[in-house]
Amino acid sequence: MSGWVQLKGVDLRYGAVRALQGVDLAIACGERVALIGANGSGKSTLLRVLHGLLRPSAGSILRDGGLRQAMVFQRPFVLRMSTLSNLALALWLRGVRWGRAKELALAALARVELSDVALRNARTLSGGQLQRLALARAWSLGPHVLLLDEPTASLDPHAKREVEALMADFADAGATLVFASHNLGQVKRLATRVIYMEQGRVLADLPVHAFFNGPLADTSREAELFVKGELG
Amino acid sequence: MNTFQESFARAMQLVADADPLLFSIVGRSLAVSGLACLLGCALGLVLGGWLGVVRFPARGGLVTVLNTFLAVPSVVVGLVVYLLLSRSGPLGFLGWLFSFQAMVFAQVLLVLPVCTALTRQVVEDAEKANGEQLQSLGAGAALRSLLLAFDERYALLTVLLACFGRAISEVGAVMIVGGNIEGFTRVMTTAIALETSKGDLPLALALGFVLLAVVLALNAVIALVTRWRGAHAEGVVLAGAAA
C-alpha cells in the first residue's frame, strides 16, 4: 500500500496546553484507522492536523498532495439555506459549475436517501439527517481520504447504524478512513487499525484484532483500562 | 387643557392633515438617513465581514479603535466633516458644506463604525463556531466572510436597523454641516430642536411622533420578516437550484 501521510515528532500547542506531543505515525492508502481515547486526549486535534486545518508547532508532516480529502465533523455546519444548496455549494467551492453542482448534489442526496428533504431548510434536519447530509457532501467531493470526528456521537441507534453503513460504503469504495470515536463496538466494526491517545500522545497503535484481543498491558496500561471501560 | 395636551392634539392634527411642511421635513430626513445608511452599511458590511475572518498583527488594535468610534458624539463627527468640507479644508473644492450631500457624508461617517463593529462581532462569532468547517470545504477568507454574513443575515438586519436609528435620530452632525436651512437642509431632528427653542411645540412633537413611527415601522417589518422565516422553515434555494 502506498502512503497517504507521515507525521514525525508532531507537537501542537494551544497557549500553555500541549494538545499533541511528539506524534509519530504513518497512514497508508486504504487503511481504516480509529482514533480512540478519553475527552481531551487529542483525537480531534490530530484529525484537524491530518486534514491541514491546524499547523503543528513542531515536527513535520508529509502528505500526498494528489489525494483529495474531506472531513465530517461531530456537529456538521450547514448554512441557513436548502439541503440541496448546501450540498451544491460544497461542490461549487471546489470549482464545479453551479448547474453541474446541483446535478451532482441531487445524486449525492439520493445516495443517502435525503432526496425528499432536498428543498427543506438544512437547519431543520434531524441529527441523523444532518450527519447523512455531511457524508453526502463529503461523498460528492469524491475524496480519497475521509476524516470523521465522532460522526455518530449523540445520534440515536438507528441513525448511528445508517451513518456507519455509509462510512463502510466509503471504505469499501477504497477510501482511506480515519475516524475518532468513543464507541468501541463501532471501532471493532469499522476499523482495521486502532490508535489510542492520551494527553496528546499516541500510547498504542495496533491492528484492531491485536488491540482488542492482545495483551494490551504490555503496550499501554491506560489503553487496557480504557478498553475495559475503567477510563474515560 | 395643559400645554402638553394641547400640543399633542395639534401635533396629531398636523399628522392627520398630512401637513406639507411636516412631510417635506420627514421626506428629507428619510432621504438623508436612508442614503447614508445605504452607503455606510454597504461599506461597513464588507469591512466588518472581512475583519471577522482575517487575522493580522494589528487587528486587535484596529478592533479597539473601531469599538471606540461607536461612542463618538455626532457633534464631533459634524465638526470633523465641517473642517473637511469648509472652503479651506481638504474637501472644500466639492462645495458641499450646508448641503444635502454634506449631511449624507456626515451620517455615513457616523454609521460606518457602528455597522463595521457590529458586523465584525457577528461574523467573528460565526467564524469561531463554524469557520473551520467552511475552510475544510475549501472556502478562503473572503468567501467565508460572505457566506457567514449571508448565514447571519437576520442578525445583520438588526445591525442595519441600529445603523438607521443612529443616523435618523442624530442632530449634532446634520446641524453643523447642514445648517438647518428651511426647505433645503432642515431634517426632523434639527427641526425639533429649532421649533422647541421657538416654542412651537406642536410641530416639534409631531415630528417626534413621526420619527418614532418610522423606527417602529422598521422594527415591525424586521420582526415580521424574522417571524415569517421561522414559520416558513423552507430553505433559501440559491438561484435556479429549485429548477
Image: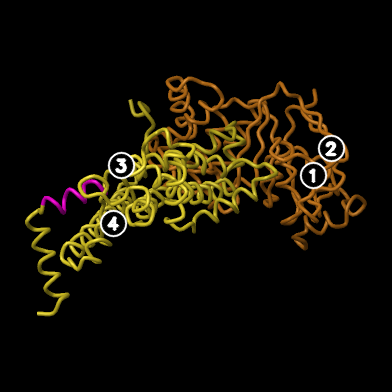
Chain colours: A orange, B yellow
Give the SS element for disc 3.
helix
Please give left or right for residue A204 compared with residue B135 in the image: right
> x%, y% of residue A57?
81, 43
Q: Which residue is mark 2?
A: A25
Q: Which residue is mark 1?
A: A195
Give the quarter of the figure containing the N terminus of chain B. bottom left
Please give left or right for residue A186 compared with residue A96 in the image: right
Chain containing the residue with disc 1: A
Kind of residue at badge 4: Thr
Give the SS element for disc 1.
strand
Q: Earlier in the sequence, mark 3 or mark 4?
A: 3
> x%, y% of residue B99?
31, 42
Q: Which residue is mark 3?
A: B100
Chain containing the residue with disc 3: B
Q: Nearest the camera: B173 or A163? A: B173
Label 2 and label 1: CA atoms lie apart by 9 Å
* Of the two numbered discs 2 and 3 in the rendering, the one whose residue sits closer to the viewer: 3
